[in-house]
Image: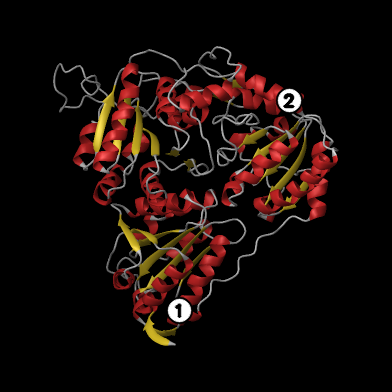
Amino acid sequence: MAKMRTVDAIVAILEKEGATETFGLPGAAINPLYAAMKAHGGIRHTLARHVEGASHMADGYSRAKAGNIGVCLGTSGPAGTDMITGLYAAQADSIPMLCFTGQAPVAKLHKEDFQAVDIESIAKPLTKMAMTVLEPGQVPGAVQKAFQLMRTGRPGPVLLDLPFDVQMAQIEFDIDAYEPLPVEKPRATRKQAEKALDMLTAAEKPLIVAGGGIINADAAPQLVELAETLNVPVVPTLMGWGTIPDDHRLMAGMVGLQTAHKYGNATFLESDFVIGIGNRWANRHTGSVDKYTADRTFVHVDVEPTQIGRVFSPDFGIVSDAGAFLDAILEVARERKAAGTLPDYSAWADSARERRGRMQRKTHYDNVPLKPFRVYEEMNRAFGPETTYVTTIGLSQIAGAQLLHVFGPRKWINAGQAGPLGWTGPAALGVVRGKPGETVVALSGDYDFQFMIEELAVGAQHQLPYIHVVVNNSYLGLIRQSQRGFEMDFEVSLAFENINAEPGSGSSIAAGYGVDHVKVAEGLGCKAIRVEHPEDLGPAFEKARALMAEYKVPVVVECILERVTNIAMGTELDNVTEFEELAQRREDAPTAIVAMAAGSGS
């Protein structure tokens, strides 16, 4: 045993638990923990410009790779309240993230001390545990419990609040004797797997809905093998996109009211059986429950017992880690395939593929200002299967999910449930930390980009290169579109005449789009390119790659869009309004997707 400060124990535990990537801002009440990190030397820290930004960086880092747990640090008072949006985004999407806040000394907690706030009470609804540690001797156990909770069952964030005197206190602690607590996850039984497969094979047109729980379990290969073994189409949810590659013959498209494919909805409405694995039946996926469940049998597999029956009662529910369930049902499916007792679903799988070829949305427009569809077409050409996309909310995200292509798990990183504006940029920086050397492409509308735009300086300072595509229509596009139901266009325009625009320059800034994102990005130490014509998109993305490689900083590609474009969405799976025409029929849709990702095709 050795005497040490509690903060030195914390840092030693972080190293042993494998959580050595931290993001935050120092301050008086958290300086003891920063001093311990400096003395240790093995914890990397990225200095953010805003604590909310730091929390999104930690979140993005956690999402980037299986097993990652990002750590967010901040001082007392407003630092903790600034983290709340980050905690919400992580909690809503089942992401582990550890937050530390400094706090006033214990004796001052009831005296309204400077920057003393009851962050424990504020954070509790958005975490698996929020705790103000009042006794120094509790610190190692609290951190140990935090890691166990973040990894157990449905993952999620934890916040530990550390009073200044608790951080400075001496305790007896031996890191060599410290061991992480065991992590237990529920596992499907053989009998449950057999019953689920019996129900699936009794159907004529079964579908697999692949949720984000499969990605959390690092079980995408098992999902693909199950689909291939059964020859059954797969519908990934928004959080499960990438569990099956977009060019796979059994990828049937996404289903929903917004981030969905026309062919995916059509195939779902033809199905008679659905097994959901690691998904939540979110309302923007289902639409009304009556329409979604009509004439279908459902099996639901989820690691969290209270998720079963939360939205509707399935015909059979299984509480299990998605990976454990896939292992169990695969064992049964392999045996039945070897015995020749599995049904032949070739005709059903072929029909889903045929719909996919017939119901592609048109993307090739030559309009100036740009139509957003052309931007995504050119992104598909420019960025290959290795690309990781990062985005959060808005028409940019909805259109991106409808039109971009994703080829593997953790290649689409999206704050899906919370959808906080401003998440994209800082989260992308966290993803770059988690995926060094890989191609990371962020996608934002102009308003999402303007939230937390200061974090671009973090990428410049710490040399965290990525490409940030900004589709700029100088509008709150999604809100404008939803205001159509109220017959108004009210307080959603961001346009103004920028007094710094050069008169007669003909630029989109002079035309009244307002903020000069190129100048702002350059002022924050990054590189930036503006694109106004469709033929310039490809060269701009190519130049962005070169600039990113040369300067090792974020590169902004701002695409000037037409002010108003409505993106397909609706109220029910069979009532999605298509504002644009469909493309020509593509019999070879998956093959065409591969060609576009490789830089050819149309």
**In the depicted view, which residue is nearer to us: 484 or 209?**
209
Q: Quadrant of the N terminus?
A: bottom left
Q: Is residue 252 above or below residue 337?
A: above
Q: Is residue 185 above or below residue 202?
A: below
Q: Which residue is mark 1?
A: 175
Q: Which residue is mark 2?
A: 270
How would you rate the neighbour count of disc 1 (Cα within 10 Å): few for under 14, some for 14-19, many for 20 or more? some
Q: Position of residue 157 (x, y in %)?
A: 50, 58
In the image, farthest residue toward the front: 338
Q: CA distance from mark 2 to mark 1?
A: 58 Å
For the residue labelled by badge 1, is the local secondary structure a helix, a strand or a loop? Answer: helix
Q: Residue at x 45, y 79 (%)?
A: 175
Amino acid type of the residue that numbered disc 1 sits on in the rendered structure = Ile
Which quadrant would residue 394 be assigned to in this image?
Answer: top left
Q: Position of residue 132 (x, y in %)?
A: 45, 71
Q: Is residue 318 left or right of residue 321?
A: right
For the residue labelled by badge 2, is the local secondary structure a helix, a strand or a loop? Answer: helix
Q: Position of residue 328 (x, y in %)?
A: 74, 51
Q: Residue at x 31, y 52 (%)?
A: 50
Report if residue 573 is visible in the image.
no
